[in-house]
Image (spheres, rainbow, N blue to C red):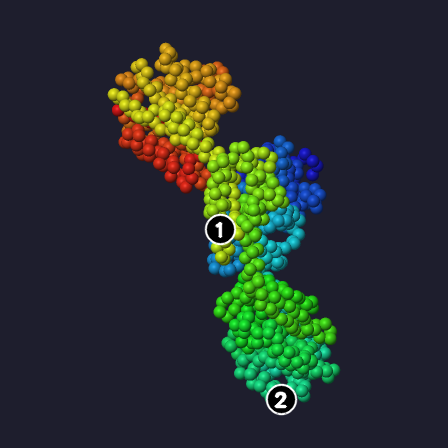
């Protein structure tokens, strides 16, 4: 048929095809065997954007995605696409937009000679959880819910549809957290970033890489930890859709056991001792590498044989019999035995044989460990004769003579140990020298024997600290020399200890005293009382730093060099009298450093008598108290300033016919920058609260000036308008505040008794709080206006309101709301309002008291860091 021609049969059957296609609830299209459109329903028209007459006889405007890279031509692509399952396709609409869809193909007739029926859905339009899928999920959950292994079901795009209880335990996620999420959340990098690409490649090519094949992979838990697991993935089709089922098995314990077994195997095989394992009949089953090196037998030569092939005639048969009786009874045997190598050479071994039991406690194997001690045995025999001669000489020497083996255990002690340690020689034999060293001194000599096999150098006059039997500390001076064999290997130590306890205690006391005097921060001077002029014989470094004179300069003279024209003569007389009479004295006098700088010296002089009571020396303790005196003077001055500043504030509450006003100011330091005031003027009462930046003396001075200006401002006619007062104050204070780099916040309020009207203005201060009678929340009173001193001319907004009986106003500075707890949290406006409301039935003074108490408790154990001021107005 030529392009554009219509088959008569198709035209005649068109109503029937339309009837069948329109009966389908989904978009549908009928193609001939060549992939040309025969008919499409209204759903397909909406999806493609074409009317039916625009596509009939033309190729369908779409192709399966999986065939795009392999097949050429629409007809071939549709014929190669899988039938009766939903596949991914791409449709090019009439408006040139490409959309992703899914399609189910039904072939009509053998080899599709009668054409193809396409059912179309937008991508994502299929129900991901149909009846069959819901049924299989229930069954999978029933099977795998109680298993330790995890089961994860995903769709072909990686979305998790089922997450079993085992998977929850394995990955740490709940099923609710994973359902609908991409399965790559369970993978560590780089697999997480690559997984979507794996699925897309499989959907497009159908080539399997892991599906149907189990292998070890890594999983990622919710806490971020990565663990080994065994993963098996299967593929299934339900309702024309593809799904993947993954079964996960945690390999963490298996890997740990595998690593431990490898470590144990390596430790046994590489052990520096010979290891042999035999069955319960004594037949050898295993020997390690060192066994073959020690005996000369290979593993093949001894496996299956009895260990008696190692026996020598030098070892009595009775010893072998005792050995077998011991291990046959299930006990462990230890002892020295002389065996024979394959080449006939004898060797000595220290052997341990232990039974190996099964879970029921029955002996199934025997483990034998041999340590070659041939050289040690020979060395013992070679030294036996010289030891006897040494013992005879030692008995004639009064100092403590000793011998220790290579591990530092005593093998000989002379009788002198009784006088030094109070121990009998036999009490030390076999014990380590560390056992008699004082606990706090055992490290001083432990380095000598920490690795005695490598130490072959004698030591001389090492000071040791021992603990006598009666608990007293004993100091000795120890010398020792190593005893080596002909190959230079250490056999033992031989040495002598001499008691130096009395000398050591004297030296230690002298050293501690000198170190203490050198390290203190006060000056110390010792003078000779028996030499005319009491010359200095010792000065510590602190005195040199204090005076500026070097220690050599101070030792060449006496302490008169520190005196000058300002030194109090009465103090000098008191010192002279103390030196002449041999008494102590304590004075504070003005001295001078080497550079001429004066300082206040607190001097304490004490005489030092000898055993006969004769004074031999004087000790002088000298302390620079200059800063201390300055601080005391400053504190006195600040205390006076504090009293002056507080005296300028109202000393008592102001009681009116229909109102009561009370306030308080608490500086953070001696003086501060917070200020409040209230006073009657004409027909009203003015209330002001202010805060100068900082809480230093400068802030206090500025605040004093502010008080004077505020009081003076109410002598003029504008005193009834708070905004005008703030504007005048700003102009008057601007120059002083600008020079001092300070600023002031201020809230100004005028209350008119009788009418109970309130006018107020704000210069950057914290808004006042209004608590209406019967209300449980605070309202903030605020007005526009900059802080005082920011600009020379500022306009302030003035507002007014009328109060009712029972209403209250609270004025405060930022030291209240910005008070900090040790945790760093601020007291804040919300806590202030809650405290104000909680105390609404109390008088103004009681309200102030409770607020301050709560703020201090909030900051405890520290004190508030900023000045605090509060004013309460209560309307009755």
Q: Residue at x 61, y 86 (%)?
A: 320
Q: Is residue 197 visible?
A: yes
Residue 833 percent location from the top left of the image: 36, 32
Q: Is residue 438 above or below residue 584?
A: below
Q: Residue at x 48, y 43 (%)?
A: 577
Q: Residue at x 50, y 37 (%)?
A: 589
Q: CA distance from mark 1 to mark 2?
A: 70 Å
Q: Is residue 139 above or below residue 787?
A: below
Q: Is residue 764 visible?
A: no
User: Which residue has dot 1 on it?
Assistant: 174
Residue 110 percent location from the top left of the image: 64, 50
User: Which residue has dot 2 on it?
Assistant: 317
Residues 49 and 756: in front is 756
Q: Is residue 93 above or below residue 710?
A: below
Residue 543 percent location from the top left of the image: 56, 43
SS for callout 1: loop
Q: Residue at x 69, y 39 (%)?
A: 1
Residues 547 and 241: in front is 547
């Amino acid at each position: 048929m030529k392009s554009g021609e219509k088959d008569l049969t198709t035209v005649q059957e068109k109503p029937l095809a339309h009837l069948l296609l329109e009966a389908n609830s989904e978009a549908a299209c009928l193609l001939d065997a060549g992939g040309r459109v025969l008919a499409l329903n209204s759903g397909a028209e909406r999806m493609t954007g074409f009317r039916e007459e625009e596509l009939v006889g033309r190729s369908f405007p779409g192709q399966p995605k999986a065939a795009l890279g392999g097949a050429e031509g629409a007809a071939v692509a549709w014929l190669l696409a899988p039938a009766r399952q939903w596949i991914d396709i791409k449709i090019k609409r009439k408006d040139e937009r490409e959309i992703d869809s899914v399609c189910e193909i039904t072939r009509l007739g053998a080899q599709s000679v009668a054409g193809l029926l396409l059912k179309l859905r937008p991508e994502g339009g299929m129900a991901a959880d149909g009846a069959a899928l819901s049924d299989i999920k229930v069954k999978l959950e029933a099977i795998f819910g109680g298993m330790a292994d995890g089961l994860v079901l995903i769709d072909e795009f990686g979305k998790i549809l089922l997450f079993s209880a085992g998977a929850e335990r394995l990955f740490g996620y709940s099923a609710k957290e994973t359902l609908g999420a991409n399965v790559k959340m369970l993978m560590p990098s780089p697999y997480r970033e690559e997984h979507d690409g794996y699925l897309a490649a499989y959907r497009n090519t159908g080539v399997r890489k892991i599906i149907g094949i189990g292998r070890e992979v890594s999983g990622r838990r919710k806490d971020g930890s990565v663990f080994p697991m065994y993963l098996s993935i299967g593929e299934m089709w339900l309702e024309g859709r593809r799904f993947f089922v993954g079964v996960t098995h945690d390999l963490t314990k298996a890997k740990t056991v595998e690593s431990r077994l490898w470590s144990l195997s390596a430790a046994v095989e590489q052990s520096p001792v010979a290891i042999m394992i035999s069955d319960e009949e004594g037949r050898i089953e295993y020997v390690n590498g060192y066994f073959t090196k020690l005996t000369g037998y290979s593993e093949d030569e001894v496996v299956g044989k009895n260990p008696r092939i190692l026996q020598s005639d030098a070892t009595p048969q009775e010893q072998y019999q005792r050995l077998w009786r011991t291990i046959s009874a299930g006990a462990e045997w230890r002892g020295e035995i002389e065996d024979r190598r394959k080449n006939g050479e004898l060797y000595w071994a220290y052997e341990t044989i232990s039974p190996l039991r099964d879970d029921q406690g029955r002996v199934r194997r025997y483990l034998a460990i041999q340590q070659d001690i041939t050289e040690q045995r020979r060395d013992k025999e070679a030294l036996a004769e010289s030891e006897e001669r040494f013992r005879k000489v030692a008995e004639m020497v009064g100092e403590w003579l000793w011998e220790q083996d290579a591990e530092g255990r005593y093998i000989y002690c002379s009788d002198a140990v009784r006088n030094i340690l109070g121990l009998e020689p036999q009490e030390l034999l076999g014990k380590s020298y560390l056992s008699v060293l004082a606990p706090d001194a055992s490290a001083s000599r432990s380095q000598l024997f920490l690795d005695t096999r490598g130490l072959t150098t004698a030591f001389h006059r090492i000071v040791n600290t021992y603990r006598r039997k009666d608990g007293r500390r004993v100091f000795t001076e120890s010398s020792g020399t190593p005893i080596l064999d002909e190959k230079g290997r250490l056999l033992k130590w031989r040495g002598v200890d001499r008691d130096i306890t009395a000398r050591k205690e004297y030296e230690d006391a002298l050293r501690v005293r000198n170190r203490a005097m050198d390290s203190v921060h006060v000056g110390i001077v010792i003078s000779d009382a028996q030499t005319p002029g009491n010359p200095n014989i010792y000065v510590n470094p602190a005195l040199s730093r204090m005076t500026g004179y070097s220690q050599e300069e101070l030792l060449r003279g006496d302490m008169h060099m520190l005196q000058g024209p300002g030194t109090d003569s009465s103090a000098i007389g008191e010192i002279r009298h103390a030196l002449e009479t041999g008494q102590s004295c304590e004075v504070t006098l003005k001295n001078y450093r080497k550079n001429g700088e004066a300082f206040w010296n607190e001097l304490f002089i004490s005489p030092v008598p000898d055993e006969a009571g004769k004074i031999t020396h004087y000790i002088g303790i000298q302390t620079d108290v200059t800063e201390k005196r300055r601080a005391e003077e400053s504190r006195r001055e600040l205390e006076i300033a504090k009293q002056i500043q507080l005296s300028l504030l109202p000393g008592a509450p102001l009681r009116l016919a229909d109102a009561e006003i009370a306030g308080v100011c608490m500086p953070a330091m001696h003086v501060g920058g917070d200020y409040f005031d209230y006073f009657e003027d004409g027909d009203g009462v003015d209330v002001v609260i202010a805060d100068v930046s900082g809480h230093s003396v400068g802030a206090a001075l500025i605040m004093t000036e502010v008080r004077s200006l505020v009081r003076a401002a109410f002598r003029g006619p504008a005193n009834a308008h708070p905004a005008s007062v703030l504007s005048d104050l700003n102009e008057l204070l601007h120059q002083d505040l600008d020079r001092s780099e300070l600023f002031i916040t201020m809230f100004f309020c005028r209350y008119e008794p009788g009418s109970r009207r309130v006018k107020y203005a704000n210069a950057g201060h914290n808004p006042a709080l209004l608590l209406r009678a019967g209300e449980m929340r605070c309202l903030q009173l605020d007005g526009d206006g900059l802080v005082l001193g920011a600009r020379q001319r500022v306009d302030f907004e003035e507002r007014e309101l009328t109060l009712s009986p029972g209403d209250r106003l609270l004025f405060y500075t930022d030291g209240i709301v910005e008070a900090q707890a040790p945790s760093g949290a601020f007291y804040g406006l919300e806590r202030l309002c809650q405290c104000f409301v909680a105390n609404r039935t109390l008088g103004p003074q009681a309200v102030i008291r409770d607020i301050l108490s709560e703020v201090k408790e909030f900051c405890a154990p520290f004190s508030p860091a900023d000045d605090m001021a509060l004013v309460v107005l209560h309307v009755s």
